[in-house]
Amino acid sequence: MVSDQFLVRFWGVRGSLACGGERYSRYGGNTPCVEMRCGDHVLVFDGGTGLRDLGNRLVEDGVDRIDLFFSHCHYDHIEGLPFFAPFYHSKTTVRLWSGHHLDGVTTKEMLEGYMHAPYFPIAPDMFKARLLYEDFTAGDTLAPHEGLRIDTARLTHCNGSAGYRVTWGGRTACYVTDTEHTPGRHDEAVLALIEGADLVIYDTTFTDNEFACCKGYGHSTWREGTALCELAGAKQLVMFHHNPDHDDDRLAAIEKEAQAARASTIAAREGLCIAL
């Protein structure tokens, strides 16, 4: 019998660039990677540097079927792929999903375009796992497993990005990163995606002051995130894709300010696990 557990665990929470050192030890410096366990199904969202530690854990746990979803393929969201241990195990099957592309590139072409000389010494044909490539269009509804529904939406980001709403056992978690809002107008696609969600992981790269100077960068703010969750009736906001210029002390101050605006808000940190 399949378990009805729904767990969300954070392996990489930093945006744009990985950060190391004591100043980033509390929240973490790895780039985006979020694991969702829906019963026995293992879903992974994005393949940033946090993917390495997750992959090692999955091998230890004996997991041999994995679904890996990409919000998009900027480097900070794919740079962990060559170091994902399950790729090197012949009894493992990994399905890779992407739907953000605006230029007709396929999921397979995306991976092969990233891993080739002179930028990387090995190609995906070195992997031993069985790889399955799943292409979709942002806005499609996906059904990777029985009882598991994933709605998607087009986000506003340079070169395209896709947001996800995962529904399992009557609970919902949304992964909405690398999106830019328009001041004074809330994104209707995001509002529809997160409506009534139990958990919303949202791009909060900038403060309001920073955002004013970064139009066109493709990122949002915690204040917009709290406003969207209020309007959509979502229960909890998890601030994500932390700015590499925000060290632990700065993030703690931002988190405190966001919690004053909406008490259930928290900042993602590596190792954080939320049971829905």
Image: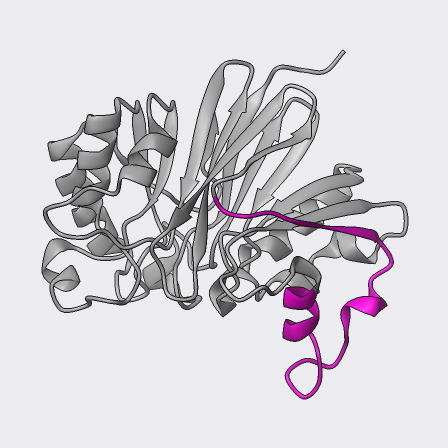
Quarter holding residue 274: top left
- In the rendered image, residue 188 lying in the magenta stretch gets the answer no
- Classify residue 146 by image quadrant: top right
Q: Residue at x 16, y 55 (%)?
A: 207
Q: As drawn, which residue projects farthest toward the top?
A: 1
Q: Is residue 204 above or below residue 169?
A: below
Q: Position of residue 23 (x, y in %)?
A: 32, 62
Q: Is residue 204 left or right of residue 209?
A: right
Report the number of numbered marks: 0
Magenta segment: 109-138
Residue 238 visible in the displayed image: no
Looking at the picture, how far across and down is residue 158, in whole percent?
Answer: 37, 65
Q: Image quadrant for the N terminus?
A: top right
Considering every residue shown, the one lying at the far bottom of the view is 118
Against 112, is 34 above or below? above
- Please tell me which residue is depicted at 69% across the width and 57% down the height of the picture: 84
Work out whether 193 lies above or below 113.
above
Q: Is residue 147 left or right of residue 152?
A: right
